[in-house]
Amino acid sequence: MRIYVLFLLLFCSMNAVSQQCDLTLSGTVKDLHDGSVLVGATLIIAGTDQAVQTNLDGAFEFKNLCKGTYDIQVSHPFCLTQGFTVKLDANTSKIFKLEHHLEELNEVLVEGHTNKNKSKTLVEAKVSNLELERNTSGTLGDALNSLSGVSSLNSGNAIVKPIVNGLHSSRVVIINNGVRMEDQEWGSEHAPNMDVNAIGNLSLIKGAGALQYSGDAVGGVIVADAPKVPVKDSLYGKTILSGASNGRGGAVTSQLTKSYKNGWFGTLQGTWKRFGDFEAPDYVLSNTGTAERNASINIGLNKFNYGIEGYYSYFKNEIGILSASHIGGASDLVSAINSDVPLIIDDFTYDISEPKQDITHHLARIKGFKKFEHLGTLTLQYDFQKNNRLEYDIRTGSDKGKPSVDLELTTHTLHLDLESHLINGIKFKSGIKASYQDNFADPNTGVRRLIPDYDKYDLGAYAVLDYSINSKWLVEAGGRFDYTYIDAYKYYKTSFWESRNYDELYPEIVVEEFDNQILTHPELYFYNPSVTIGATYTFGKDYELFFNYALASRAPNPSELFSEGLHHSASRIEYGDLSFNSEIGHKIMLTLQRNNDVFSFSVSPFVNTIKDFIVIEPTSIETTVRGSFQVWEYRQTNAQLLGVDLDASYAFTDKFRYNYQFSFVKGYDRSQDEPLISMPPVNMKNEIVYLNPEVHNLRLALQSEYVFRQNEYPDNNFEVYIPETESTEVVDISTPPDAYHLLNFNSSIDFNINTKSKLTLGFAVTNLLNTSYRDYLNSMRYYADDLGRNFILNLKLNY
């Protein structure tokens, strides 16, 4: 027996000696996103005590391994630990990639890079979550108003359009959760059809440098994204109740998110708002109520190397138009503009009557991305939008309750984007976009169509490269080309057709002539190049200097080309021009910024020269069967805008902080050597904030807002004949209102309900002194004062 055991041990020993255990497993550990090496990563062979760390080159090596299959565990600070399986038959080299910067995981995976692909050489202004939640019952324009360089173009109090450095409407592109909003944004009284409560991150790029979004953003790009979702097992949400004294209404919004560690997630969100007539300090602004209902759902799967996401939102908004702005005759128009109070003042009501607008907007998106090792991240997105805009005039008889404008805009868009890291320090982004848009103007309104039926095709391609030269310098350059084709069918009044000399300019597009109308078939082509180049220089401890030049070109929109008739919600007749060319803007922007806990500031001067700038302005008055209305006509000119935005913040103590904002913009018509219409007046804000984290995070803020009188404006006054008095009166629609000063107060305090839930109580007062004023950029200023004092109470429950 002893001999047998000795023989067996000898055999095993001979077998062990014969096995090759001199193999090597080596390689490097890298960041999954940009391929940079990870220093200090720990690699452990599972089931053994063999462990190594990566060196300064991210390299590792295991020696004296036998043939076989090994499970390798790789870990690194700020990374998610991962396991890899390696089959070893010979000396082997491997590259292990980890998801670095775990805190950025949500942004990368959930958003599919929509947040990361912004210009590196333009300062991005961001709206804080606190400001977003403070505007629960407000609009996107209200929230953006907290940024310097942003004003608002109002039609009453519920229709608010952002103005960026003096430009608005089609010149300011809005990206809603990765989708460019197509909601007939051309009209000054067409507010963005977005729920501010569905936004998790809101930023503004004051320039045309973000070419991946658009080439026609002559004014800037607004990017609104849904809240980030963590990649872990979690269930959380929030509900906000808001009540306001002015309008005697409020809003409720709620959001619930469920996420899983395996990457699946889902978010439901909904908002309901209801307000009655709003009030100026001395009277009710009759028929200015609003009702809004919104909902959205977002479902997706996030993995390290791939992901897919589906999103749908529904937006429904009904807004009353100030009754006093719809005038019956020429004498009434003169009386309304010259009167200190509206000609129509009724008792407060929640009813919304004609004139009004009723908007429904559907938005759906599906997006997927995949990371390829030697190519980069490829993202494919399809989105669909349907916008139905109804405008109601005061009609009688069988037409009572029937809209006067019924436009349905349907848009299909396909995006393909690629983001690559060429070599260390160089990032390359490129993509193509194709879209088809169909506008249908329902003839069953029985009213001459302001905007005709048309099909619109867009095709665009871009490429942007940014290069980090060193820790101080970053340069960026990019280009984009967009092609637009518009295929329309439009009826022109013969008198208008001939007055514009179209009968000699465009005889080939006439399809058929009727008694007093001409059916035409215009086909328009636009080719729009865009370029951006810039640099960022970091110096000192806290300073950054941004420089950016951008060439942007914008094709005229259908409103500017084809408008011909009464725009009911604007209470004016509008005329476009078929001969318009694309606008071409050259903008130079410089920003010096200091980021410091005690004293921070940024100063951003800019100059924007725009060739063939399209402006709309009043020219006369026209009497129809509906009454007398101002006539506003589009025209092209050469414009120049220049200005400066200034932000500063200083902490007196750890609890008191002073904030300051100043915006100055001037716009000139260089062809006619006169100021441009609707340029924001100089304005500044001063704010004192008290914040004490030790007292339930108590925050108290008193803000002073001063808006100067606009002293530079064009003279667009005209005369009108008053039959009743057989006299001629001057209609003064040019003279801006006086300067005004408002005091605003806001506060909030937090209460912990339990370890996972928190209640935030907010109280605010706007126009604290109940000041009567009229704003130059509010089209209703001709007829009534702006809003009076407003008490606002917010209750937010996080859970």
Image (tube, grey):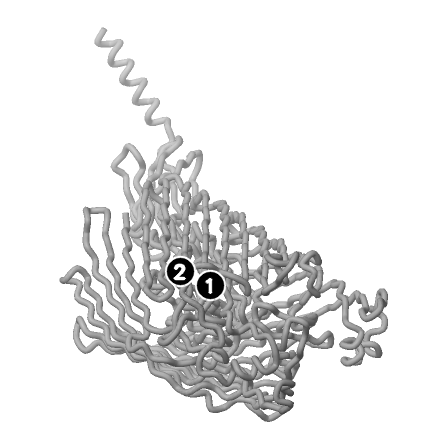
Task: Give the structural element (helix, strand or loop) at label 1.
Answer: strand
Q: Which mark is residue 196?
A: none
Identify the residue shown where x is 41% and y is 52%: 271
- Which residue sits furthest front? 724
**The N terminus sits in image quarter:** top left
Residue 355, percent across and down? 55, 65
Q: Is residue 541 left or right of residue 519?
A: left
Crowd tier of the residue under label 1, counting other residues whose Cα lies within 10 Å: few below 14, some 14–19, many 20 or above: many
Mark 1 and mark 2 lie on one chain; the one further toward the N terminus is: 2
Which one is in front, 424 or 749?
Answer: 749
Give above or below for 263 relative to 586: above
Give above or below for 234 relative to 14: below
Can residue 168 be seen from the camera position used here? yes
Identify the residue shown where x is 80% and y is 78%: 498
| Residue at image mark 2 | 201
Residue 674, percent across and down? 57, 92
Can residue 603 be seen from the camera position used here? no
Q: Amino acid at mark 1?
A: Val
| Residue at image mark 1 | 223
Quarter of the image where one finds residue 187: bottom right
Asked whether the residues under the numbered discs 1 and 2 touch, taking CB atoms below 8 Å apart as contact, a structural biologist would say yes
Q: Is residue 547 left or right of residue 256?
A: right
- Which residue sits furthest top? 1
Q: Amino acid at mark 2?
A: Asn
Residue 741, percent across and down? 34, 82
Whole-angstrom CA distance, mark 1 to mark 2, is: 8 Å
Identify the residue shown where x is 81% and y is 69%: 518
Which one is in front, 662 or 446?
Answer: 446
Quarter of the image where one finds residue 136: bottom left
